[in-house]
Amino acid sequence: MWTLANREIRSFFSSLIGYMVIGIFAVIMGLILWVFPDFSLLNYNYAGLEQLFSLAPMMFIFLIPAVTMRSFSEELQNGTLEILLTKPLYEFEIVLGKFIASLCLVGIALLPTGLYYFSIYQLGSPVGNIDSGSVIGSYIGLLFLSAGFTAIGVFCSSFFKNQIVSFLSALCLCYLIYFGFFYISKLPVFFGKTDDIIQQLGMDYHYNSMGKAQLLLSDCVYFITLAGLFLYLTVENIKSRTF
């Protein structure tokens, strides 16, 4: 499993995919947080990274499907999945290997944002006047969110040979699970009755909860369960394929 994950990571950086993901994320977030006046951290009277953590999920809804779209689609297109399945690996090890590799790439893309925290830390008055607990909680929440998106992307990739179709299906599914339950809860039939329960089914509810410097077990369990569910479905889909 780890050998496969290592191979996948190396393949990311042997092509433009890895560099493009990291570069696009860093450039767009940098422009939004430091240049565009409506979001620039320099235009606020307090030190914080709320803009980063509120915008990052929307970025990841696009970027993570772009990372995961080749996970199994490429294998299916090239006919190499059958060869991979003949290796001394269980199906769940293959799925986990590809999941870990994609998640590592997302984690690497997040590393440069540490400079934003350092900059805000130094710009605070006095120096260090920033809610570090909230920042750490938001980073942890973002990693859990990334794991959920990555599992969904790998799942969609296991269905389609075409990488573009895999990308679009993962993008739509990530968007629906992140925002969909919030909008459903606002329907008249649910609003004021079970809207809070329905919102708790969505990723945004638990992600926002983690950004309040309170790491609740229920939020962690939600993301672990969500990622585990889609990885399990991916394994079952791989097992059911006939060549």
Image: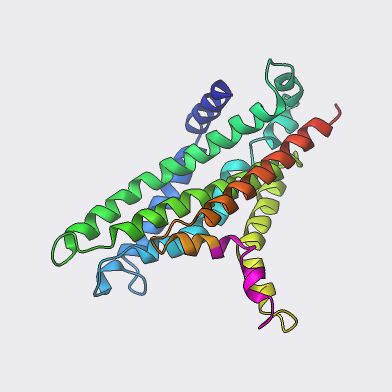
Viewer-side residue, 164 vs 57: 57
Instruction: Tell me the residue at 65%/63% (across/down).
Output: 201
Query: Where in the figure is residue 154, as x and y percent of width and height?
Result: 65, 41
**Residue positioned 36% across, 74% down in the render:** 38
- Where residue 188 appears, x then y in whole percent? 72, 84
Q: Note whether 205 is above or below 192 in the view shown.
A: above
Residue 164 part of the magenta segment? no
Q: Is residue 197 magenta?
A: yes
* Residue 178 pos. (x, y %): 60, 61
At horizontal 42% and vertical 40% (from top left) the residue drawn is 108
**Numbered disc total:** 0
- Judge left or right: residue 125 versus residue 180: left
Residue that protrudes farthest toward the front in the picture: 217
Is residue 122 at all visible to an observer of this figure?
yes
Residue 163 visible, this orientation: no
Front-most of 176 and 167? 176
Residue 228 locus on image (x, y percent)? 64, 43
Q: How is the image coloured?
A: rainbow
Tell me which corner region of the image, top left, top right, bottom left or bottom right, holds residue 90: top right
In the orientation shown, which residue stands out farthest toward the left? 126
Q: Quadrant of residue 161?
A: top right
Task: Say if 101 sits above or below 122 in the image.
Answer: above
User: Image quadrant for the N terminus?
Assistant: top right
- Residue sitting at x 68%, y 15%: 88
22 or 54: nearer the eye? 54
42 left or right of 192 in image: left
Quadrant location, the C terminus? top right
Q: Which residues are magenta?
A: 192-205
